[in-house]
Amino acid sequence: MVAEDRIDIDIYKVVTRAIAASDNLEDMAAQLTHLLVGALGIKGCTIFVLNPDTEELEALASFGLSINYMNKGPVLVKKSLDHQLRGEPVVIRDVAASDRLQYPKDAQKEGIRAIISLPVKLQGKLIGVLRLYHHETWDISERDLDSLIIFTENIGLALMYIRLLQAIKFVRETVSEIHPVWLK
């Protein structure tokens, strides 16, 4: 059976514009999770950021998943679909037939049948994960997987841009408090 393409140019434009238009990390991530769930007709989506000190993936935004599922426990990079450490997407077509999940019983209880997990990288380094959850088994097309990989590359760039923008704003505010004349 050939997998059907779901991401067309209209979805691509909407998602890319949402990434490019935001200057707030949480707002951008929340908007993306909503857009991807609606556009792809899936159960849920979460954008995680990596905490390098604890090696945990911390949810930045999520849509479509229950509070119980989101609070199931820490999502550890090395135990949670660790192919992302090598920068590879992970496609779990059928959760019930996989032994690769950190919390398989919680996923099944949540009604998750398939998971696609993509690393968000910046300059080759893992900084987060985009994870899509489907209520059905999912044969994702190569084209859609390529589109999602490009989305994650753009998310990585947006994370860097927004963090730099926030740093510049902080420096500007600090300088204006010390020497308000310098900024005129």
Image (cartoon, helix red, strand yellow):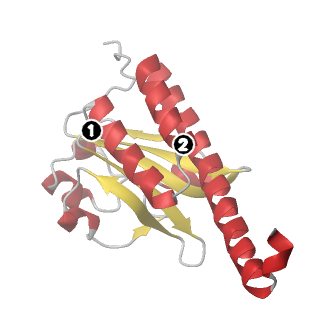
- Image x and y of residue 94, in percent: 27, 38
**Along the line of sight, the residue nearer the viewer: 59 or 89:** 59
> What's under tag 2, amino acid-wise?
Ala
- Image x and y of residue 122, in percent: 68, 51
Asked if residue 98 can be seen in this view, the reply is yes
Q: Residue at x 22, y 63 (%)?
A: 69
Q: Between marks 1 and 2, how big is the CA–CA gap? A: 35 Å
Q: Which residue is mark 1?
A: 94
Q: Residue at x 75, y 78 (%)?
A: 176
> What's under tag 1, amino acid-wise?
Asp
Q: Which quadrant would residue 150 be assigned to in this image?
A: top right
**Along the line of sight, the residue nearer the viewer: 106 or 21:** 21
Left or right of 112 on screen, residue 169: right
> Within 10 angstroms of label 1, few (less than 14), some, or many (20 or more) residues?
some
Instruction: Name which of mark 1 and mark 2 comes first in the sequence.
Output: 2
Labels 1, 2: front one: 2
Residue 152: numbered disc: none
Q: Which residue is mark 2?
A: 21
- Image x and y of residue 123, in percent: 74, 50
Quadrant of the drawing holding the C terminus: bottom right
